[in-house]
Amino acid sequence: MILDGKVTSKALLQEIAQEVGRLTGPTKPKLVAVLVGENPASEIYVARKMKVADELGILSELHRFPAHTEEAFLKEELEKLNQDTSVNAVLVQLPLPKQIHTERVLQTILPEKDVDGFHPINMGQLLLGIEPPALPCTPAGIMKLLDAYKIDVSGLNACVVGRSNIVGKPIMLMLTQRNATVTLCHSKTRNLEAVLESSDLVVAAIGQAHLISGNTLKRGCIVVDVGINRLPSGQLVGDVDFESAREKAAFITPVPGGVGPMTIAMLMMNTLRLHQVQQGIQVKNWLL
Ligand code: GUN
C-alpha cells in the first residue's frame, strides 16, 4: 500500500486553512523565511513554502541575502525578526553558505518563533519527551502520515538510516516517544543489512539514490523514504529502490509525493501553532 503524502497533506492543509479562517483575533499568523545565497534546491523549496502559506491565508515574507553574507549580519537580521511582534514564525533555509556556522545561527532565533523546531531548547524538549510548540517538519510529517494510515509504531523495531539534525535524530526521538525500538544507522554502521532484515519500520534519510533495495527488507515492513536525489537522467528518486522495495513492504512512501508534501504541511501547522501560543490560544492536536 502506498503512503500517499499528496492526498494526506491536502486534507491537512484544508484543516489548517479552515482554522486560519476561523481566527477572530487582530492578527493573522505570519511566517518569515530567510534564504542566504542561491542554492537551486533551496530556491524551489522556499518558493513552495511561500506559495502554500499564501493559499492558506498565512502571511509570509521571504528575506533574501547574498551568498557572501557574514554570520554577524545574518544574526542581526534574525534579532530584528525576534523583536518584530507581527512575526510569529521564522525559518532559516538550510544549508547555509560555508562561512556561516549553522548551529550558532539557529540558536539566534527565539525558541517561541522557531518554526523548524531546530533551536537547542526545542530539540532538548523533544529529547525529554515534552512536545515543543514546533517539531521539526519532516519527522513530524512522517508521524502524521503514519497516523493517517493508522499505523501504530509501538513495539516495532524501527531502523532510521541517517543521523542528521533535521531528520535522523528527531525522528529517532519521536519514534522512541511512541514506544518503537529504534536503531539509528549511518555511514559508519557495519552491518546495515542485518539491521534492515529485522526492521519492521525503515526510515531512509541518507541522501544517496537507491541505497536500500527490496532484498534487504523484512517482508511486510513499512518503508518511509525521505531521500530526494536527482539521477543523471534528471529523474527524482529516493534513498530506496521503490520497485524492488514495494514487493516486500506492506506500506511504502513514493518519491516524489510521499514525505515531501507532508513537510510543507507541517511547516504550516507549526506556523499556526506558534501564532496560537503567542496569542494565548489553546493549542489542540499535539502530535506526540
Ligand atoms: N533544508 C532541508 N530541510 C529543511 C527544513 O526542514 N528546514 C529548513 N529550514 N531547511 C531545510
Image: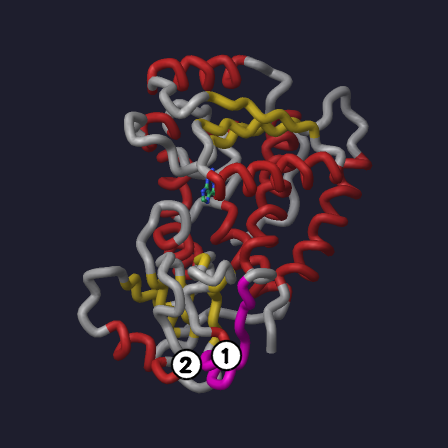
Label 2 packing within 10 angstroms: few (<14), some (14-19), many (20+):
some
Q: Disc 2 designates what residue?
A: 214
Q: Are marks 2 and 1 in contact (CB under 8 Å)?
A: yes
Q: Residue at x 50, y 59 (%)?
A: 234
Q: CA distance from mark 2 to mark 1?
A: 8 Å
Going by the numbered disc 2, the residue's amino acid type is Gly
- Estimate the x, y position of residue 101 in percent, counting from the top left: 29, 28
Q: Residue at x 36, y 63 (%)?
A: 160
* Tag count: 2
Q: Residue at x 39, y 64 (%)?
A: 209
Q: Which mark is residue 243?
A: 1
Is label 2 in a helix, a strand or a loop?
A: helix
Q: Quadrant of residue 89?
A: top right
- Estimate the x, y position of residue 197 in percent, counting from the top left: 33, 81
Above or below, 270 against 106 in this view is below
Going by the numbered disc 1, the residue's amino acid type is Glu
Q: In front here: 143 or 235? A: 235
Image: magenta residue range = 244-255
Magenta-span inclusion, residue 69? no
